[in-house]
Amino acid sequence: MRERALRVVLTTESYLPWLSGVTISVDALARGLGARGHEVMVVAPRPAKRAEVEAVGSPGPAPSYAWLDSYQLPRLAPAGYRMAWPNPADAAWKAARAFDPDVVHAHSPFVTGMLARNLARRVGAPLVFTHHTRFADYGHYLGPLARPGSFLTDAYLRRFWAGCGAIIAPSAGLAAEIGDRLPPSQRGRVHVISTGIDIAAIRALDPVDPGPAHDWPADAVVVATLGRLAPEKSPEVILDAFAELAEKAPEARLLVIGGGPSEASLRARAAAADLAGRVAFTGSLPRVEALARLAGADLFAFASRTETQGLVLAEALAAGLPAVAIEGPGVADSVRDGVDGTIVAAEPAATRTDRLAEAMRELLADDGRRKEIAARAAAGADRFAVDARVAEVEGVYRSLLG
């Protein structure tokens, strides 16, 4: 007997057209649940005027939307990132109550998280929370308020978790961290479910060769990095390591895919004598175009140590790129060291870039080994399939509904 379809409200502090791991994850879950026959409503900050929510490659039907009144934070948030007003009388929340969900699934613990908690209580539905962000890693944006801000955030999170029927962590490491901060009686609420990706769509991409656009030689071997260019993502480590690599591998080139607040300083670094002519920047791109550029490279480099999962690692592997990544949260959940990539030790920090450069050099120097690892990366990417991850989330919902 087929189980009945569910009505699910997903709430989020940020959403499309803003591109991030969180917004892609929410879209993938919403469409994936729809593909499984469920009714889904996304409650999110209203996009800026004339901005449209476009498909970003996740399979399944578009959900219904309830848009919260929103605003552009003048300084801390980047342009295009909309913040929701904490207004419980907002028409979007009236629409969510009228939707009468079986499950309320929050993707942020703050403004929309508090409203999600109130909605769940109001309609008698269980509250599920996915912990997407290591908030302490963004303290540098608060300046002198970073320390007290971190303390207050941690205390608030513990209280928020206590009100959730289930907590989803995208990686085993994050799940362990959350479990350690919960009373023993509540640790069973934590579930490890990574964000899934559309493997077939990534495999079907037409790779974009970066060589002609940047006048690189035909024998260039391209290292790519993809993500937001911001301090918490450590893109400067990639450039410094590539500079060391370039001394020994003159055929190597670096493609930096993405944009962000660090882009200007990174471009200045790339103009230095040891990198001039070897590094190209794409700026911010639509997701599908960014992935096509990624697929045209030969190797993927990853240095962020602030992730909950590192979704781009799964995307790179699915595109058939061996990954060289500095060990950090979520990395080992995606990269199988020695199988489809190399995980570089993070400590000691003083020689971290040396180890990253050497790991890249070893793979670039051995064309046969690199191609063998690339084949394993592409073949093994089915473990990231979005339909399997969505099914796991549905299983959490049904366990709460009994």
Image: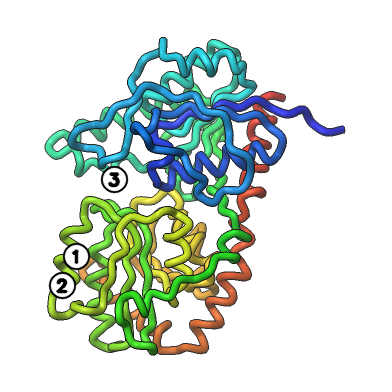
Q: Position of residue 315 (x, y in %)?
A: 50, 60
Residue labelled with disc 1: 267
Residue at 58%, 13% in the rendered image: 98
Q: Residue 267 versus residue 242: which sits nearer the camera?
A: 267
Mark 3 lies on residue: 137
Up-down relation of residue 16 to residue 205 (above or below)? above
Above or below 225: residue 248: below
Given contact means CB atoms under 8 Å apart, are the residues at marks 1 and 2 in contact? yes
Q: Quadrant of residue 115?
A: top left
Q: Which residue is depicted at the point 29% across and 27% down?
A: 71
Tell me the element at label 1: helix
In this view, 239 is above or below 173: below
Is tag 1's residue or tag 3's residue first in the polypeptide sequence?
Answer: 3
The tag earlier along the polypeptide, 3 or 2, is 3
The residue type indicated by label 1 comes to Arg
Q: What's the CA distance linking mark 3 and mark 2?
A: 29 Å
Label of residue 271 in the image: 2
Residue 214, percent across and down? 30, 76
- Residue placed at 33% from the left, 55% from the top? 284
